[in-house]
Image: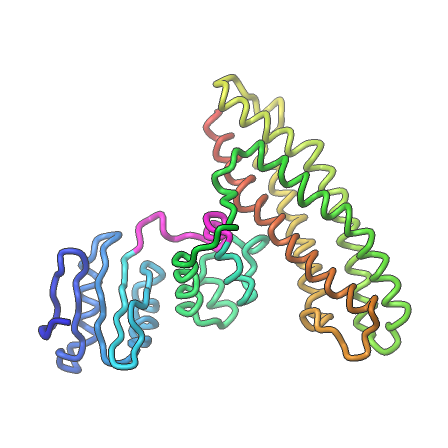
Amino acid sequence: MPNHQSVDTGKDIVINVPSLEPRLKHPTIFQTFDKLEKGESLIIHNDHDPKPVYYQLLSERGDIFTWQYLQQGPQWWDIRVTRKTDAEAETVGQIAAKDLRKAEVFKKYGIDFCCGGKKTVREVCAEKGIDATKVEQELQQTEQSVTGGNTNFNDWNLDFLADYIVNTHHQYVRKYLPELRGYALKVARVHGGHHPELLPIQQLVEEVNDELLDHMTSEEQVLFPLVKKIVQAKNSNTAYSKEQNGSFATMVQQMEQEHDSVGRAFDEIRKHSNNFAIPEDACASYTLFYKMLEEFENDLHTHIHLENNILFPKTITIEKTLG
């Protein structure tokens, strides 16, 4: 690392913080950052973690930069700070849509990327009291991992994606929700005396059942056929009338409200069950019930994510181009 205060390497400007006078350290970083064009970077080279600079920069300049650790001690810390382009203020839903591996990071920190997917990482972290730099760092690390099983739903044709949602996630709900209701009722009757939390859980499962079945029917009979009409109109360059078919964007608002309702119900189930923690006195049915609940929630998150963050917004964008 160079011994002078800052150097333009041709790619990134490197600020060698230990070589600066104490009173000039933060001002130099800020002045250099302010001169960056969108998409340009600087590298902070320091002898300790400059995390306070992150918080000061976020407070005084706003959420307009990314913070990437290149080296983390024990002797030196190197951080690349990049001024965001307009396209980089992505929501958690958009991030998961581009790379579903990153959804696992969101799940780890309890970040809702499906129903609550319209917020940025830093907005969500601020609300939940989570260290945003840790989350951002783990998101960056997923890009370096190689996993052959990652499916890029974002590249799929929308009519095919609609069929996939029906054949995979709607079928899953119809297959396992009746079993879930049966176990909820059975376990609440047998163990509800010692575990009163099972009673509201059973009621919430019934609410999910009532909401989801009607919701999926509406999607299959009205919304998804409309997706195919819109895609066909675009592909064949034929006329499409919102007045005749109804505005897709308006219909989506109702669907997303229903998604939110089901998502809130499962949030309550998770709270009542202490994150599906199985009690010591749980019988086989009780254990299976909690495992099924957790699996159902995981499938539901992917199900809603595919609709809220990929299928719906992309179809709305196409609909707007059709006039």
Q: Residue at x 23, y 70 (%)?
A: 44
Q: Residue at x 41, y 64 (%)?
A: 136
Give how far across and how far down residue 114 sits, in percent. 57, 53
Q: Is residue 119 above or below residue 164?
A: below
Quarter location, residue 226: top right
> For the magenta stretch, what is the residue range?
84-100
Tell whether 256 sits left or right of 204.
left
Quarter location, residue 187: bottom right
| Residue situated in front as seen by the camera: 223 or 71 | 71
Give how far across and how far down residue 103 sits, in percent. 52, 57
| Residue situated in front as seen by the camera: 51 or 48 | 48
How is the model colour-coded? rainbow
Whether residue 323 is in magenta: the answer is: no
Give how far across and how far down residue 191 sits, in percent. 87, 73
Give how far across and how far down residue 281 sits, in percent. 82, 78
Q: Residue at x 74, y 38 (%)?
A: 217
Q: Is residue 87 above or below residue 137?
A: above
Whether residue 93 is in magenta: the answer is: yes
Residue furthest to the front: 148
Q: Residue at x 49, y 31 (%)?
A: 318
Q: Is residue 94 above or below residue 185?
A: above
Q: Which of the image's four quarters has the N terminus?
A: bottom left
Quarter location, residue 65: bottom left
